[in-house]
Amino acid sequence: MITAIREVRRAKGLTLEDVAARCDPPTTAQTIGRLETGTRTVSVAWLNRIAAALNVAAADLVRLPDRPEIPVAAILDASGAHAPRRPAAVVPPQGEPGMVALTVTGAVGDYRAGDEIWCQPLDPAQFGRAMNRDVLVPRPAGRFLFARLIGRDGGKLHLLPLGAGARQQVVTDPAWIAPAMKLVRTL
């Protein structure tokens, strides 16, 4: 099995020691290095442990023939674009089970026409994780509100719509909310 463990680890700016310490249970940097280079066989259990340590899906660590890898040609920072120090690649975004999406047809806030916003629904017990994030909130009669979650008071959510000059809205006891997780934008 050909893996992309090294590429994902490097893309996240982590060392072998970092990943080894994040594994549950922790392991050694040497073991992670052997799994990266293929000198030790990568089992499904190892893929799952390393994926959790890197905060990615296990599928992101496996190179599949139908899933293209895009080589990184340059890195952009405040000083400009420059060549990467070592070869790197990115993998196109992949959805997770249960995700929902919004498509943007007219610019609003930081979003442009043509954007796709991928959101992960949360149940009421997890609403605190979405504080100060853009969220999709279901409303009665099949309507929705997409706004910034700015406060929470019991079952009441205080939301600030994204348009300029918009007034705060309060939604009481929604069944779920879905914070924005990925922005897919074609330039």
Image: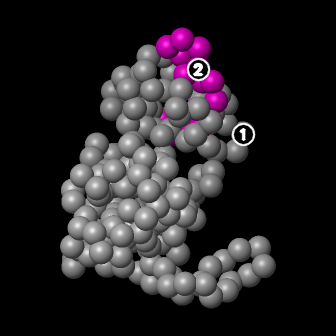
Q: Secondary structure at mark 2?
A: strand
Which mark is first along the chain, 1 or 2? Answer: 2
Locate residue 167, reporting x and y percent.
67, 30
Q: Secondary structure at mark 1?
A: loop
Q: Which residue type carries mark 1?
A: Gly
The image quarter containing residue 75 is bottom right
Mark 2 to mark 1 CA distance (whole Å): 21 Å
Locate residue 12, reporting x and y percent.
53, 63
Residue reaching furthest to the top = 154
- Packing grade of label 2 (10 A; few <14, some 14-19, many >=20) is some
Q: Which mark is residue 152?
A: 2
**Camera-side residue: 13 or 126?**
13
Figure check: 96 above or below 125 = below
Figure check: 68 above or below 17 = below
Locate residue 138, reporting x and y percent.
40, 30
Kindly identify which residue carries mark 1.
165
Q: Is residue 4 magenta?
A: no
- Packing grade of label 1 (10 A; few <14, some 14-19, many >=20) is few
Q: Is residue 139 visible?
A: no
Residue in view at x 43 percent, y 65 percent: 30
Q: Which residue type carries mark 2?
A: Arg
- In magenta, the rendered stretch is 144-158
